[in-house]
Image (spheres, grey):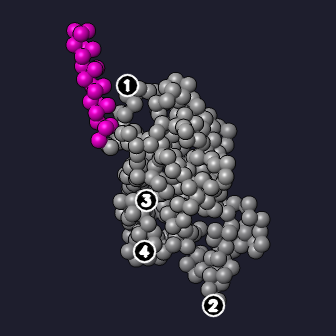
């Protein structure tokens, strides 16, 4: 029986190895090479979270920004001595250092037990799931098998990240490039139930929306006054405002309730409710947290497949901030 049991394990191992050779991600990718990888990452993320809440929004946002430029390949993690890497582009300068640190710490913990096996891209994907759970959001199985990218250029970021003033057509066009539907886009926007933004990203909505309407009329008037109080003109650019004014530290469907009430921080948030073609989905998510959670999980798994490198493409970085050679 032991002989047959050993043969069965060998066959399973071959299936796993061959299964990863066709470019497809799979949940049990490290079953034989680093079976405890998800537990190791989870422990590292939990430790970092115990030190600062910023771990949660910073890591989740880092995953989005990584996947939208070059695909989910940890290219955003690269540090360049010349200041010309992906993370150095102006729209990425606001990525909180705690997100990067979360991945670095998790990678160090994984390397200690499984050296040279698990990519930084996979560690970031696992960590993104783990921070959602820590904030009270849904858990889900993460598909694995990504390899780390070999390109990280600030010059390749422009036009690949959503802007806070985007309308629905612009949002849909950008997400569609990554095989993400309008429904997926609205679900992923729900990540704005966590985190913060600097005042300059939405100041035009409260001071210079149009010559005849300095304040965006789609903003709830009381909310607009609150924002003016927190973000007076010529405010310190480092001042940050919660994206969700009601439950900023909980992953829930409050974001969509805020949109219904005219309390979306960005134009690109509020347009999801003001545009009739997306309003129905917002209403559904606002009324049904279960629907939102399910849609978010599906969209996150789809996002995690964007532009992945598998097989002999890319590399397994030993240090997430540097290419191996």
Q: Position of residue 74 (x, y in %)?
A: 51, 46
Start and end of the magenta stretch?
1-22
The numbered dot on residue 107 is: none
Task: Evaluate if marks 2 and 3 touch, with contact meaning CB atoms under 8 Å apart.
Answer: no
Residue located farthest toward the front when viewing the structure as drawn:
325
Q: What residue does disc 1 label?
A: 32
Whether residue 167 sits left or right of residue 209 in the image: it is: left
Tell me the CA gap for discs 3 and 1.
Answer: 34 Å
- The mark closer to the camera, 4 or 2, is 4
Q: Quadrant of the N terminus?
A: top left
Whether residue 166 sits left or right of residue 18 in the image: it is: right
Please report the residue visible at 66 percent of the width from the left and 54 percent of the height from the top: 83
In this view, the residue in front, 123 or 21, is: 21
Q: Is residue 7 magenta?
A: yes
* Secondary structure of the residue carrying numbered label 4: helix
Please report the residue visible at 42 percent of the width from the left and 63 percent of the height from the top: 175
- The mark closer to the camera, 3 or 4, is 4
Tell me the CA gap for discs 3 and 4.
Answer: 16 Å
Q: Quadrant of residue 47?
A: top right
Tell me the CA gap for discs 1 and 4.
Answer: 45 Å
Tell me the crowding category of disc 4: few under 14, some 14 to 19, or many 20 or more residues within 10 angstroms, Cα based.
few
Q: What residue does disc 2 label?
A: 212
Q: What residue does disc 4 label?
A: 169
Q: Quadrant of residue 219?
A: bottom right
Q: What residue does disc 3 label?
A: 187
Tell me the CA gap for discs 1 and 2.
Answer: 64 Å
Which label's residue is closer to the chain start, 3 or 1? 1
Which label's residue is closer to the chain start, 3 or 4? 4
């Amino acid at each position: 029986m032991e002989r047959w049991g050993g043969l069965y394990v060998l066959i399973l191992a071959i299936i796993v190895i061959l299964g990863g050779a066709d470019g497809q991600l799979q949940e049990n990718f490290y079953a034989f090479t680093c079976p405890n990888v998800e537990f190791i990452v989870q422990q590292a993320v939990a430790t970092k979270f115990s030190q600062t809440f910023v771990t949660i929004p910073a890591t989740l946002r880092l995953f989005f920004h990584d996947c939208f430029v070059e695909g989910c390949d940890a290219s955003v993690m690269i540090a360049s001595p010349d200041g010309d890497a992906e993370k150095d582009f102006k729209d990425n300068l606001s990525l909180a250092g705690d997100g990067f640190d979360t991945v670095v710490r998790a990678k160090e913990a994984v390397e200690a037990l499984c050296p040279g096996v698990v990519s930084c891209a996979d560690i970031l994907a696992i960590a993104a799931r783990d921070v959602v759970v820590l904030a009270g959001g849904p858990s889900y199985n993460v598909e694995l098998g990504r390899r780390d990218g070999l390109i990280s250029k600030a010059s390749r970021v422009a036009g690949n990240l959503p802007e806070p003033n985007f309308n629905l057509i612009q949002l849909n066009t950008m997400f569609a490039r990554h095989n993400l539907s309008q429904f997926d886009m609205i679900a992923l926007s729900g990540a704005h139930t966590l985190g913060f933004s600097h005042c300059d990203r939405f100041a035009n909505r409260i001071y210079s929306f149009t010559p005849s309407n300095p304040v965006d009329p789609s903003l709830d008037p009381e909310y607009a006054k609150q924002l003016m109080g927190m973000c007076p003109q010529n405010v310190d650019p480092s001042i940050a405002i919660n994206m969700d004014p009601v439950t900023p530290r909980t992953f829930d469907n409050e974001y969509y309730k805020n949109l219904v009430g005219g309390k979306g921080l960005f134009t690109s948030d509020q347009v999801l409710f003001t545009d009739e073609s997306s309003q129905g989905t917002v209403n559904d998510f606002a009324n049904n947290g279960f629907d939102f959670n399910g849609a978010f999980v599906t969209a996150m798994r789809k996002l995690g497949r964007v532009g992945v490198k598998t097989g002999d493409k890319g590399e397994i970085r030993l240090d997430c901030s540097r290419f191996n050679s």
